[in-house]
Image (cartoon, rainbow, N blue to C red):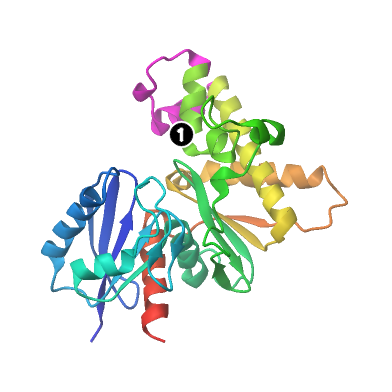
Amino acid sequence: MKESYLAIDIGGTEIKYALIDDEMTILKHGIVPCMTDSMDHLLEPLLAIQKELHDQYGGVAVAMPGRIDTANGIAHTGGSYTFIHNEPMGKVLENIFKVPVTVANDGKCAANAELVSGALKGVSSGIVLVIGTGLGGGVIVNGQVWLGSTFGAGEFSVMPTNLEEFYHYQGNEYTPPVWARDYASSSLVKKYCEKKNIVDISTVNGRIFFDAYEAGDSDAEEIFHSFCEGIAAGIFSIQSVLDVEKVAIGGGISARDEVTEGIRSAVNYAFRNEPFLPFGKPEIVKCRYGNDANLLGALQFHLAKTQK
């Protein structure tokens, strides 16, 4: 008989959850809103999920932001959940769900899903780049997700884009010049609004931006091409250190084929301009699992930990 598991993806505004069997078939999906201001508000929707599904799972796999020690269930940080400092989240959640719980970083979960059966299956080295409100992801080294010495590998958002400005950044005068500031998905909308003198950014979303792009709006085209070039420049820098086989592009924006195609074209151009590089060009591919990657990858971490 197949075993069912509960997989949970804790995001900044909502928590996604799913019942998944041990063959990675998703049996049921759900989404609940969440708040990031306190532990009580984080646990409240999780308690509701437990109440709904309490007798339908044999284990729980959790993806969440932050520096996560998966082996010991410790969340050293929690991303937008800034109140989390060295919290034993595994134990906290086991007290709620009454079964073994595995906790892992969300970007690393996405990388794990793509490594096990997705776009990076069979690679020895690779990158998953998740383009969302930030730029996260995961690193594959020797066929395994690399956690890093302090569990922070793959936190691409904070890569500096202007070293001099970054060095002199004081923490309160302006947003630091890092990759996520200019090249997260939200930057497309922000720059488009600035170009069009739109004061209320809330009136424009990604769909409106890409509608303008498809309609041949020259401002949208310019912003999109610059976006792809900025992502390609970051990939170039990462490749100079890791020399990976493939880079898989994920996040909600990757549902649009022109995003991966645009990044691939920009990467090809960057490598054509440097013919004598001491490292190879990675293959740019689209992630397979999209919005389900964190759920599936979290379960892969859980199965690897509990079925040894």
In x, y percent, where is residue 31?
23, 52
> Counting other residues with Cα less than 10 Å from the Cα at mark 1, is it few (<14), some (14-19), or many (20 or more)?
some
Magenta stretch: includes residue 216? yes
Where on the picture, by quarter, is residue 166?
Answer: top right
Horizontal side of residue 158 vs 30, given as left or right: right
Residue 57 within the magenta-colored segment of the rendering: no
Q: Nearer the viewer, residue 99 or 86?
A: 86
Residue 51, how many percent across, how many down? 11, 63
Compare residues 168 and 225 and report the one nearer the observer: 168
User: Which residues lie in the magenta part?
Assistant: 195-217
Image position of 52 with respect to 208: above or below:
below
Q: Residue at x 54, y 34 (%)?
A: 181
Residue 291 in view (yes/no) = yes
> What residue sits 37% from the left and 74% below the top?
302
Viewer-proximal residue, 72 or 161? Answer: 72
Q: Quadrant of residue 53?
A: bottom left
In the rendered view, does 224 fall on the left or right side of 41? right
Asked if one can make out residue 215 in the rendered structure from this viewpoint, the answer is no
**215 with respect to 60 (left or right):** right
Counting from the top left corner in percent of width and height, residue 78 is at 39, 52
Taking 130 as reference, is 169 above or below it?
A: above
Pointer 1 residue? 186
Q: Is residue 198 above or below residue 146?
A: above
For label 1, the SS is helix
